[in-house]
Amino acid sequence: MSELQKGASNKKSTGNWRVLAACLGLVVAMAGMSYAAVPLYQLFCQVTGYGGTTQRAEQYSETILDRTITVRFDANTAGALGWDFKPVEREVELRIGETKQASYVAINTGSAASAGQATFNVTPQAAGAYFNKVECFCFTETELAPGESLDMPVVFFVDPAIVEAPETRNINAITLSYTFFPLDGEKPVAEAAGPDGRDRL
């Protein structure tokens, strides 16, 4: 084999190894991205309000408008979770910017202890960026003994900026919906609402 042929063979071999290394790097990067997808999506939803995801607030609103808005409460269970889960009140009317507390109650109607975790959304989806929760039971692992009941408060307010955005200024009712999933099943992030305004299970 001539020196010219040997050089060409070495270059081809080096090129093959580079392609292999690039492919392996791509596989590792894709695996890492898929592992990080759920927490990154949850963070994205919480920051932008995408998919009806509500905002977390550290303090109450300092501005309260004269305009009122109705907040309705919805409750669902998914999978084999044997809980009776419902809001204490179906709806409240409050002034925009006013802080309000509502409660949900869950009762384990099964014969064994079971655990669940709640996801949530807001409809209309555009209102999610303006619905601020100061206190919430969502994404908290909750275990109930047979027959045990638990009161779960939600403290919230609607950001007065909702009346300024063209896509939200005419909204006069918001639905806050929770779905409890069994802990041994899939635990999705905030669910996008279906056409009927309820969570897609």
Image (cartoon, rainbow, N blue to C red):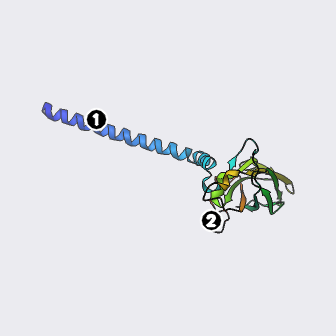
Q: Which residue is mark 1?
A: 14
Disc 1/disc 2 C-alpha distance (Å): 53 Å
Q: Residue at x 67, y 51 (%)?
A: 161
Q: Residue at x 65, y 59 (%)?
A: 169
The image shows residue 29 at horizontal and vertical percentages of 47, 42
Mark 2 is surrounded, within 10 Å at the Cα level, by few (under 14), some (14 to 19) or many (20 or more) other residues, namely few
Q: Is 104 in front, or is 172?
A: 172
Please indicate whether residue 77 sits to the left or right of residue 24 in the image.
Answer: right
Work out whether 141 lies above or below 69: above
Q: Which residue is mark 2?
A: 194
Identify the element where label 1 is drawn. Answer: helix
Work out whether 27 lies above or below 110: above
Q: Quadrant of residue 178?
A: bottom right
Residue 66 visible somewhere in the drawing: yes
Residue 190 visible somewhere in the drawing: no
Badge number at residue 189? none
Upstream in sequence: badge 1 or badge 2: 1
The image shows residue 115 at horizontal and vertical percentages of 76, 52
Please indicate whether residue 46 sits to the left or right of residue 11 in the image.
Answer: right
Q: Quadrant of the N terminus?
A: top left
The amino acid type of the residue labelled 2 equals Gly
The image shows residue 112 at horizontal and vertical percentages of 82, 56
Q: Is 164 in front, or is 117?
A: 164
Q: Between label 1 and label 2, give the one nearer the viewer.
A: 2
Identify the element where label 2 is drawn. Answer: loop
Mark 1 is surrounded, within 10 Å at the Cα level, by few (under 14), some (14 to 19) or many (20 or more) other residues, namely few
The amino acid type of the residue labelled 1 equals Thr
